[in-house]
Image: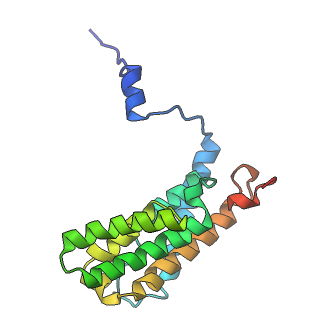
Amino acid sequence: MIQSFEPPPTRFIAFLGIAPNSTSHKERFLCALGGFLSIFAVIWITRYFVPEGGVALVVASMGASAVLLFVVPASPFSQPWPLLAGHLIPGAIGVTCAMLIPDLVFAAAITVSLTILAMHYLRCTHPPGGATALTAVIGGPDIHALGYQFLLTPVAINVVIILVIAILINYWFPWRRYPASLKSGS
């Protein structure tokens, strides 16, 4: 006897936050293309600024930034100020905490806490920035050896490249024009 699959009850689906998704296939592929091109460009370009065998060419949090910039380009979290300041300020907080707080657990916790506070007050909330800050603390000896250079290479280079790619890709589509301030009527 073959049993048919019954989806979980509606309340459970709602609890999990599984929402209907009416995004077209074209839009989904455009988002994926943007993610591919941005990370490809970040790694390809950054390798010219980082010595061979040096630290990572890309901060892993750029993957999360790519999701925001190409899936929800109109989101307040995706705009240029939150993207730029939301990586650089947390990066500076992380580097500072890594230098001043010898206990890794406490340094990591205080870094994320201060990052959240700073992003709130400076109106630059960009969730991937929390990971950038944390990377400065738990990234290991190669990251620690960079000190504040971590803010330039790789963070600033990564962020500027991903911003330029997001503008180049999203600008041409009126329904996803980026930055949001460029949408007609704004």
Question: Residue 128: image x %, image y %?
Answer: 44, 62
- Looking at the image, the residue that sits furthest to the front is 121
Task: Say if 145 sits above or below 82 in the image.
Answer: below
Q: Compare residues 51 and 135 and report the one nearer the observer.
A: 135
Query: Would residue 128 be seen by someone viewing this image from the given angle?
Result: yes
- Looking at the image, the residue that sits furthest to the right is 185
Question: Residue 16: image x %, image y %?
Answer: 38, 34
Question: Residue 66: image x %, image y %?
Answer: 52, 61
Q: How is the image coloured?
A: rainbow
Q: Residue at x 57, y 76 (%)?
A: 160
Query: Left or right: where does residue 33 sit relative to residue 58?
Result: right
Q: Compare residues 56 and 90 and report the one nearer the observer.
A: 90
Q: How many marks?
A: 0
Q: Residue at x 20, y 73 (%)?
A: 104
Query: Left or right: where does residue 67 sit relative to residue 140?
Result: right
Task: Say if 164 sits above or below 18 in the image.
Answer: below
Question: Residue 121: image x %, image y %?
Answer: 50, 65
Q: Residue at x 28, y 85 (%)?
A: 99
Q: Residue at x 34, y 66 (%)?
A: 112
- Looking at the image, the residue that sits furthest to the left is 103
Of the 4 image quadrants, the one containing the N terminus is top left
Query: Would residue 178 be seen by someone viewing this image from the given angle?
Result: no
Of the 4 image quadrants, the one containing the C terminus is bottom right
Q: Quadrant of residue 116?
A: bottom left
